Image (tube, helix red, strand yellow):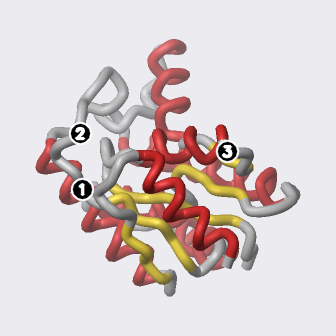
């Protein structure tokens, strides 16, 4: 387990990326979400590993991204806060009602993060869709529930972020990083 690696998870549009950006501005090491980068690259190259085309291929791409990120983050000093983790990929497959291959399960159990996981709850007031986030509000809420269940299944302690502005959320996370 890598105690200095902290995951922020939740459904789409719940303020995870904004929080990560704020923490980075405050001098905390961070890692961006892989899903958006994968989508941008796949669209650019005409690839099929897109959540709305081939969910399995997209999940494999995400797993590869998260494994690379994990190894990169593990060598960083001090706390590192990342936008999603390996367990999110298992949650994504579950959300898509797809079987979870053994290597996904093994990766989630082998490459562990700090036991405390920050969960950005479904928050209708701030949700917005875009070219890379095609889920509707209902899907965002279901995603939030799936990530909660999946992280608990893997033995993580869920710390729900308050429904407050990004600065207050950053202050909240920083209290845990210091303890």
Residue occupying the point 50% across, 86% down:
155
Q: Which mark is residue 160?
A: none
* Residue on which disc 1 sits: 122
Element at badge 2? loop
Asked if residue 82 lies left or right of residue 91, the reply is right
Element at badge 3? loop
Counting residues from the N terminus, which is met first, the one under dot 2 or under dot 1? 1
Q: In the picture shown, does residue 52 fall above or below 24?
A: above
95 or 157, which lies in front?
157
Residue occupying the point 16% across, 46% down:
124
Q: Residues within 10 Å of mark 3 (few under 14, many from 20)?
A: few
In three-dimensional space, the C-alpha distance between marks 2 and 3, rounded to whole angstroms, equals 24 Å
Element at badge 1? loop
Contact (Cβ within 8 Å) of mark 2 with mark 1: yes
Counting residues from the N terminus, which is met first, the one under dot 3 or under dot 1? 3
Residue occupying the point 48% across, 83% down:
157
* Residue on which disc 2 sits: 127
Asked if residue 84 lies left or right of residue 48, the reply is right
The x and y percentages for residue 49 are 45, 33
Asked if residue 13 lies left or right of residue 81, the reply is left
For the C terminus, give its image quadrant: bottom right
* Residue on which disc 3 sits: 26
Work out whether residue 22 can be spotted: yes
Counting residues from the N terminus, which is met first, the one under dot 2 or under dot 3? 3
The x and y percentages for residue 22 are 56, 42
In three-dimensional space, the C-alpha distance between marks 2 and 1, rounded to whole angstroms, equals 8 Å
| Badge count | 3
Q: In the picture shown, does residue 167 fall above or below 80?
A: above
User: Residue 153, located in which quarter of the rendered image?
Assistant: bottom left
């Amino acid at each position: 387990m890598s105690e200095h690696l902290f995951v922020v998870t939740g459904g789409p549009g719940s303020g995870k990326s904004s929080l990560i950006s704020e923490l980075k501005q405050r001098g905390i090491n961070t890692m961006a979400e892989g899903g958006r980068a994968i989508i941008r690259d796949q669209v650019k190259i005409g690839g099929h590993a897109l959540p709305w085309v081939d969910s399995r291929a997209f999940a494999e791409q995400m797993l590869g991204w998260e494994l690379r990120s994990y190894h990169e983050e593990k060598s960083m000093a001090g706390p590192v806060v990342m936008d999603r983790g390996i367990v999110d990929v298992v949650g994504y497959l579950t959300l898509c009602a797809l079987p979870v291959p053994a290597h996904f399960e093994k990766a989630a159990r082998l490459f562990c993060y700090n036991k405390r996981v920050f969960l950005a709850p479904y928050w209708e007031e701030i949700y917005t869709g875009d070219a890379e986030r095609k889920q509707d509000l209902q899907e965002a809420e279901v995603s939030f529930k799936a990530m909660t269940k999946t992280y608990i299944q893997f033995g993580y302690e869920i710390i729900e972020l308050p429904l407050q502005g990004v600065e207050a959320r950053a202050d909240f996370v920083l209290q845990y990083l210091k303890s």
